Amino acid sequence: MKKIEHYVNGAIVEGNSGRLHDVLNPTEGKVQAQVSLATKSEVELAIAAAEKAFPAWSSTNPQRRARVLFNFKALVEKDMDNLARMLSSEHGKTLPDARGDVQRGLDVIEFACGIPHLQKGEYTEGAGPGIDLYSMRQPLGVCAGITPFNFPAMIPMWMFGVAIACGNTFVVKPSERDPSVPMRLAELMTEAGAPEGVLNVVNGDKEAVDTLLEDPRVEAISFVGSSDIAQYIYANGAANNKRVQGFGGAKNHMIVMPDADMDTVVNQVIGSAYGSAGERCMATPVIVPVGKETADKLVEMLIPRVKSLNIGPSLSEEADLGPLVTAAHKQRVADYIQMAVDEGQDLLVDGRDFVLEGYEEGYFMGGTLLDNAKPEHQSYVEEIFGPVLQIVRADNLEEAIALPSDHQYGNGVCIFTRNGSAARDFANRVQVGMVGINVPIPVPLAYHTFGGWKRSSFGDTNQHGPEGVKFWTKVKTVTQRWPDDVLSSDFTIPTMK
Ligand code: NAD
């Protein structure tokens, strides 16, 4: 059986905890590898490696750090096919989706290649007589990233790309469900020229996470995953004096106004609700048609499309979606569908009994479509994270704005309309962090920033873009006085008049 270990100090290090976690092949429905779960002392070795690497890396000039990232980008591009296959076979998303996962991470690496410009400070000449004032953005030290299963390439790169570019050293704790890609990325970073210890990967579970949270050598932690854990990381990291950002779950709404082009809406929601088996934090698992006529038309058009989704093995180039990540997650999604039925929602298409011929043990589900979900339904309040679309009918735009605004999550939202004024009003007033106007999955590009509101995000800085540089650096401001006579006279702070 293949074993997945840790990556510390520029090399693979065998785990010695004796604790192993099964890594599944969701298409086949069987165990394909085992990953070592690190002990406290193993995580401490990775932290020590990062600590040792910090002085030299942080004093490497930014242009040289950027060159390592340029090399890394080229190596990842060369390895794209291998990475996408690795990712797809552990996660279950289709190959084109897996390539997209890697590419979105690379977009952030590309952004981080601009670090010589991005990390520049500010300067005021002549702030007083003979006085100049300048600020610099310095790296924090050892930083850590704890990542979810659903974007095993993109999210680690979001974090370590910017952090390392800023001069920090890094420990990634990937999801134990699909750890191979982060391990490979660390190897490629070494090949790209990053000195030993700059990027380390420890595989593990709560024990590893708690060690990162408690160790005083770790200065900052970025977390992406479910909201309860994000809140736990935020609270405990802060209690241990760390800088923390925690990104959580989502329940994104797509608002459909009566004037929207319905063919576009249906084409878009099929991809955004069911693509990657709904296991995206920016998926749209809720659609809100405004007005009865819009709702009835939508239902009529959606039913045949959901029934004819092309579900295939993850390594397929053509499938719309592959399997869910684990049998346990598949069961959880099925339980939510039953909950929705029990709450009184209309089950228009039921994907629970779907079996893919030749892959009977795989964790496949068909698409599910539910109508008449209500704000008070638990299955609407919670994140399902599967190929399930719930229709919540609204009578007018006001009601449609209130639904995502009042929801506990506030990651993404979108509106489909031809009316610029309605779209503008919606975008300005809706209480959600990322808004799409006729764009179903409004993920901001790497040079903007990514982050939701409410229980989708804990902390006050977003991922990547200028906010990423802010999160991974601290500001130092220097007030300097060099009048001609400063060296010969007694130095006293000038009195303000
Ligand atoms: P998860 O919360 O189960 O796991 C995330 C990480 O936390 C993993 O590394 C895991 O090992 C660790 N972890 C799990 N339980 C822990 C515990 N008790 N104590 C400490 N650490 C623990 O999330 P997941 O299932 O891997 O990912 C899916 C979730 O991530 C969804 O809720 C999804 O919406 C969310 N997500 C959010 C964003 C975003 O940017 N907001 C992006 C992607 C995914």
Image: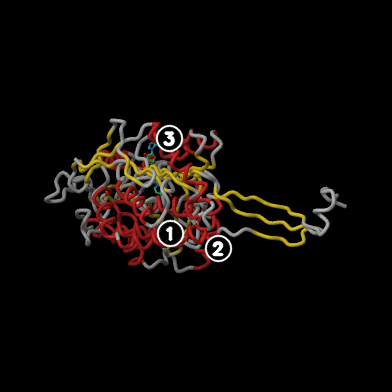
In the picture, the disc for residue 44 is 3
For label 2, the SS is helix
- Residue at numbered disc 1: 69
The residue lying at 50 percent from left, 53 percent from top is 433
Percent coordinates x, y for residue 78 in the rendering = 30, 62
Give 318 or 196, whichever is nearer the viewer.
196
Residue found at the far left of this picture: 358
Looking at the rendered structure, the kind of residue marked 2 is His
Nearest to the observer: residue 359 or residue 396: 359
Q: Is residue 269 left or right of residue 331?
A: right
- Return the x and y of residue 224 as percentages of the image width and height: 42, 45
Label 2 to label 3: alpha-carbon separation: 34 Å
- The residue lying at 56 percent from left, 36 percent from top is 241
For ligand 1, tell me if the residue under mark 1 lies within 8 Å. Answer: no
Q: Is residue 44 above or below residue 77?
A: above
**Quadrant in which residue 22 is drawn:** top left
Tell me the CA gap for discs 1 and 2: 14 Å
Q: Is residue 6 left or right of residue 213?
A: left
The crowding category of the residue bearing disc 2, from other C-alpha atoms within 10 Å (few below 14, some 14 to 19, many at least 20), is few
Is residue 455 something one can see in this rendering? no
**Quarter for ligand 1?**
top left
The reply, left or right, for residue 67 in relation to residue 320 is right
Asked whether disc 2 touches disc 3, contact meaning CB atoms under 8 Å apart, the reply is no
- Look at the picture and state if 439 lies above or below 202: below
Question: Regarding mark 1 in the picture, which secondary structure is present there?
Answer: helix
- Name the residue tied to disc 2: 117
Residue 87 image point, x, y percent: 28, 52
Residue 439, placed above or below residue 279: below
The N terminus, quarter of image? top left
